[in-house]
Image (cartoon, rainbow, N blue to C red):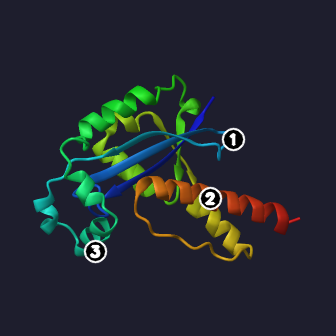
Amino acid sequence: MRKLRWLDIETTGLNPDKDAILEIVVGEADFLDPFNVKIIHRSVMWCHPEITGDFDPYVVAMHTKNGLFKECGNDEKALDLFEAEAQLLELIPQATEKEDLDLLAGSSIHFDHEFIKVHMPKLNKRFSHRHYDVSAIKLFCESRGMTPLQKAEAHRAEDDILESIAHAKACEEWLRTSLK
C-alpha cells in the first residue's frame, strides 16, 4: 500500500543549489490513514559552528535560538548527508510501479522535495512527483471561509511535522462541519 512520508527539513537557506540541509525528520502513515503517523527517522547533519558567518543572519538567529546549530556541531550525534540518506534508503523501500511511489506530505512540501532532489537524489527516486500538501489544503479551506490557522514557527523538523498534521486534521474537521 502506498505510504505518506511526512517529511520536514531545516536548511541554511532557501536555495537548494547553494544551501545545506541541517535537519531531517520523516514520519510514515498509510495513505488511507494519513494522520496515524509514526516517526521513523530523525537526524541532524554535521555543521561546523564556525561557518555560520556565511549564512543568512535570519537563519543563524533562528537556528541558534531553537538549538539546531548546537546539535549540528555535536560530533557524536550529527551525521553527514550521505549517512542520513543511507539510513533513509534502508527505511523507505523502492516501489516497483510508478503509481505505488510514496507521497511526500507536509506544509509547503515542495520546498523540502527540492532539497531532497538536489542533496539526496537516490532517496528522491522513491517519491512520487505528487504531494500531500497541507498548505494547499489550508488555502482551500480559507478560500471557503475557514479562519486561518496560526503557525508556531518552531523551525524544528519534528515540531513542524506535528503541526502540519494538526493543521490537516483541523481542516478535515472544518470541512466536515462547515460545508454540509
Can you identify the residue that label 3 sits on? 58
| Contact? badges 3 and 1 (CB < 8 Å) | no
Indicate which disc residue 33 carries: 1
Residue at 62% from the left image edge and 69% from the top image edge: 139
Residue 106 in view in this figure: yes
In front: 75, or 51?
75
Look at the picture and state if 141 lies above or below 87: below
Can you identify the residue that label 2 sits on? 166
Taking the image as shown, residue 148 lies to the left or right of residue 95, namely right
Q: Earlier in the sequence, mark 2 or mark 3?
A: 3
Rounded to the nearest angstrom, the CA distance separating label 1 from label 2 is: 14 Å
Picture coordinates of residue 35, whole percent (x, y): 65, 47
Residue furthest out toward the top: 96
Q: Secondary structure at mark 2?
A: helix
Taking the image as shown, residue 122 lies to the left or right of residue 28, namely left
Q: Quadrant of the C terminus?
A: bottom right
Residue at 50% from the left image edge and 70% from the top image edge: 152
Q: Earlier in the sequence, mark 3 or mark 1?
A: 1
